[in-house]
């Protein structure tokens, strides 16, 4: 049962992160990945704790861990990428998918598909109950 869940997760991630293409092309790409038994996953190498190079020169971080889980049954090639390389590497086929902190926005959605975030970011300011905030200027220290 767990293997079926992992394969479904893989299919969802792959289809969710590929460049927009006809449905048959997406199915072909997924079949190619399954046939060759490996998947190339772009991961950040300079954005801790999501992805970085550790003291032992091994890639580490949340996104790296997720990439390894996706490809556990297939074998994986982690391809370190910079933020600017994420979309070009996807659309050019240099990577099969990207596991990286990247906000979905309408401009990016024109060229790639997004899966659901496993670790969504939320921006907030926290202050004590005695601090009165009525505008951003009140947050200046």
Image: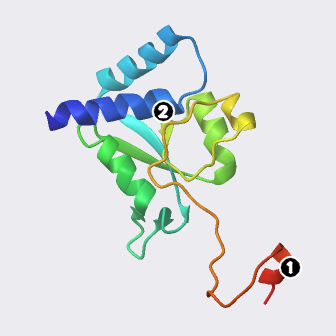
Quadrant location of the N terminus in the rendered image:
top left
Image spot of residue 79 (x, y percent): 49, 47
Q: Is residue 22 positioned above or below 8 on the image?
A: above
Q: Is residue 125 positioned above or below 39 on the image?
A: below
Q: Residue furthest left?
A: 1
Image spot of residue 26 (x, y percent): 48, 17
Marks 2/1: CA distance? Answer: 44 Å
Residue drawn at (39%, 44%) of the image:
77
The one nearer the camera, 89 or 138, is 138
What residue did someone put label 1 on? 137
Residue drawn at (47%, 55%) of the image:
119
In terms of image quadrants, where is residue 60? bottom left
The reply, left or right, for residue 92 in relation to residue 32 is right
What residue did someone put label 2 on? 96
Label 2 vs label 1, nearer the camera? 1
Structural crowding at the residue carrying mark 1, measured as other residues with C-alpha within 10 Å and reported as few (<14), some (14–19) or many (≥20): few
The reply, left or right, for residue 96 in relation to residue 76 is right
Structural crowding at the residue carrying mark 2, measured as other residues with C-alpha within 10 Å and reported as few (<14), some (14–19) or many (≥20): many
Question: Residue 110 has which mark?
Answer: none
Q: Residue furthest top?
A: 24
- Labels 2 and 1: the sequence-earlier one: 2
Residue drawn at (40%, 30%) of the image:
12
Image spot of residue 105 (x, y percent): 69, 40
Query: Is disc 2 placed on a helix, strand or loop?
Result: loop
The reply, left or right, for residue 38 in relation to residue 19 is left
Image spot of residue 51 (x, y percent): 49, 61
Query: Is disc 1 placed on a helix, strand or loop?
Result: helix
């Amino acid at each position: 049962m767990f293997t079926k869940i992992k394969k479904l997760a893989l299919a969802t991630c792959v289809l969710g992160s590929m460049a927009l293409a006809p449905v048959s092309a997406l199915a072909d790409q997924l079949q190619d990945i399954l046939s060759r038994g490996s998947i190339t996953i772009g991961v950040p190498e300079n954005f801790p704790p999501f992805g970085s190079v550790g003291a032992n020169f091994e890639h580490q971080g949340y996104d790296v861990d997720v990439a390894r889980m996706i490809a556990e049954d297939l074998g994986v090639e982690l391809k370190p990428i910079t933020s600017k390389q994420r979309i070009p590497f996807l659309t050019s086929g240099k990577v099969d998918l990207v596991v990286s902190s990247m906000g979905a926005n309408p401009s990016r959605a024109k060229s790639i598909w997004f899966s659901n975030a496993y670790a969504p970011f939320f921006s907030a300011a926290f202050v004590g109950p005695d601090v009165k905030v009525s505008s951003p200027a009140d947050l200046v220290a």
